[in-house]
Image (spheres, rainbow, N blue to C red):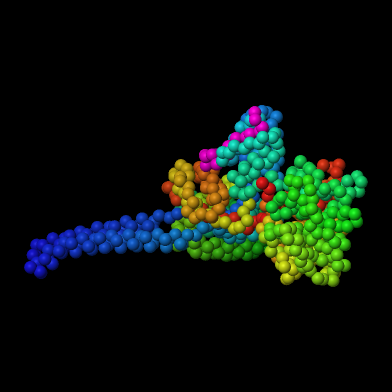
Amino acid sequence: MNPHLYIGKEPNFNKIIVASVILHLVFITLITIPLRSREREYKSYFVNIVTPAQIRRTTSAPAVKKKGKTTGKSVKTKPSPRRRVRSPKGVRLESTDRLKNELQRMKAISAIAKLKKEKEEALDKSKEEEEELAEALEDIRKKKQISISTGPGAQGVRASTKTDAYSAVVRQQILAEWIHPEFESALEAIVSFKVNTNGDVIAPRIIKSSGNRIFDSSTIKAVKKASPLPPPAVDEEIEVRFHNEKELSS
Amino acid sequence: MKKNSAVNHFKLNYSVIICSLLVIIFVTAGFSYAKIYIDIASPGIRKLPITIKSRGPSKTKKELEWIIKRDLDTTGMFEFVDPDVPGGEIVADMLVSTADGLSVILSVNDLIEGEEVLKIRLSSSKMNTRSMAHSIANHIYKVATGKKGIFRTKISYLVNSSSGRKNLRVMDWDGFNSTKIVSRGLTSGHSWSQDGQHLLYSSERKRKWKIFVRNLKQPRETVLFSSKGLNLVGGTSPDDLVSFSSSKDGSSEIYVINLRSKGLKKLTRSFGIDVSPVFSHDGKKIAFVSDRGGTPQIYTMDANGRGAARLTFEGPYNQSPSWSSNGKWITYAGRKNGKIHIFVVKSDGKDLRQLTFEGNNESPSFSPDGFLIAFESDREGARGIYIMRLNGEGKKRITPKNIKATAPRWSPYLK
């Protein structure tokens, strides 16, 4: 009687497994959500803007240097062809079709430039040129290093700069609309909202109150006034941390 | 039995598949989904666009609008948008009626939130347009900033009369409705009681300096303290104490006297001269001027006279301190490059700022909200009373140019 009873209960055991797995999943998600939210990183304007600009500066700096040197040599037609001589080698690293076309065009131009150069310049100058070319090659090598270093994570970098650029625009647009009176203490509020693909701000709400009604409402209003935002590719959820620096107050 | 277990096995597999699918769904949903986080620091003070419009008798409503705008403009927090032009975030609409006294139905709408944030009916039996306008300005200010407006406060001040006397007068904070309080003898140091009901002042009568107290609603003054020497009122505390300086025992020292019991207490015993004692608004501290260090400088001490510490170290001559309502700032007048200017400094001596740069500027006094400072200045020739914001902006003269007005003292909030 007894063993029979236990056998009869076996299907229930399965149900228990299913239920326990589901409960585990619910438990895990409940734990991961707050964990994820703890990892929130509120990006400030400066971080967003500075990063891309710095990359640009490091890559363009050698070219600027070169320009200064060549103009110093008082041959005005030279700088542009010479740069073009260099650039194909540098660009070759990235082998996209568009770049290939560009490369061919540049090669042609550089060939012409070379011919011109040969005609124009005396033999004694060629030494200097060689030196310069060596310098240029070094620059290219440096460039290579940069492109290699950014190479593996290129996609990730590109993606993050894209959202950085988007959040910078959103940030600017909201900041332009934020009006609040003077407060005696440092306050902070976090507003959460969705942006649909039309750029409309949907359901902005305070998820962390500053404790000051006027401050809170000023943040919600700033978000509402900033609508429509630049339309994102997909619906985005945005969280904005508003805070005031300590101001000169009574 | 076998069959049964096979079925069970199948069921088990089935449920495992479902579970693993659920796991995949949950995990991917949880991690592929990313929010954008943005951080915005305050852009600082920006003016709130506000539209003020009214209906009713044209003369009254225009006057009301004008005074309200002038009030709000003093704070530097508002930008006025014409009713015909869109762009106002807050719209204050007044329905003015002069049928029975003066009544105004004020409705304030927040256009961004799309809701009415205030609707109130104000009325007075008298045609007191200024008082009504100040009340309305207070309501609008409260709705917009969450803070109490100072538009119904008053300023007491001294006027030099043609006969060489100094009269004590009280006016609205914007310079209007000036009324005479004392015109006998020579009046000097004066202060408001913390309830705003009384004025305390020093006046010379029959060659004797006495301290008087007067209820502003009654014409009678009573003597609070009288002695030989010079007795000058400094300030008042919330617990009915009046601080003053007296040279009754020779050198000028600081005393406090209780308004009710008239109990007297001497707080300082230094070799130098101690004058201009003012209580902080909580009554726990006193700021005063002393030359114990060689030159007149501002000092602070506890209300019981202990723990005196020098506050100012810059400049050869610093005087007339006044506390901000939260005790954070002290404003004073100090000599710099041969001229006297207004300064503010934190009560711990840090963050010193010069607020005036033209002419001579003296006797600063904080408004009860701590955002404005009244002071006297000769920047336009004759001495007059001016007000400015805590950051030194928005200076404007509030007394007429044909009278010599000095020593403003801002009242507490009044009912």
Q: What residue appears at the point 85 percent right and 69 percent down from the top-left corner?
A: B272
Relative to A70, is B8 on the left or the right? left
Q: What residue appears at the point 61 percent right and 57 percent down from the top-left corner?
A: A185
Q: Is residue B293 above or below residue B397?
A: below
The answer to which image quadrant residue B130 occupies is top right
The answer to whether residue B127 is seen in the rendering is: yes
In the rendered image, residue A165, in percent from the top left (x then y), is placed at 52, 52
Question: Within the magenta stretch, is there residue B115?
Answer: yes
Q: What residue appears at the point 65 percent right and 28 percent down from the top-left corner?
A: B99
Query: B153 or B210, which is in the foreground?
Result: B210
Question: Within the magenta stretch, is there residue B370?
Answer: no
Instruction: Examine the residues drawn in magenta and state their main secondary structure.
Output: strand
Relative to A89, is B294 on the left or the right? right
Magenta-highlighted residues: B99-117
The answer to whether residue B395 is seen in the rendering is: no
In the rendered image, residue B172, in percent from the top left (x then y), is placed at 74, 44
The answer to which image quadrant residue B194 occupies is bottom right
Q: Is residue B2 above or below residue B412?
A: below
In the rendered image, residue B286, in percent from the top left (x then y), is placed at 73, 63
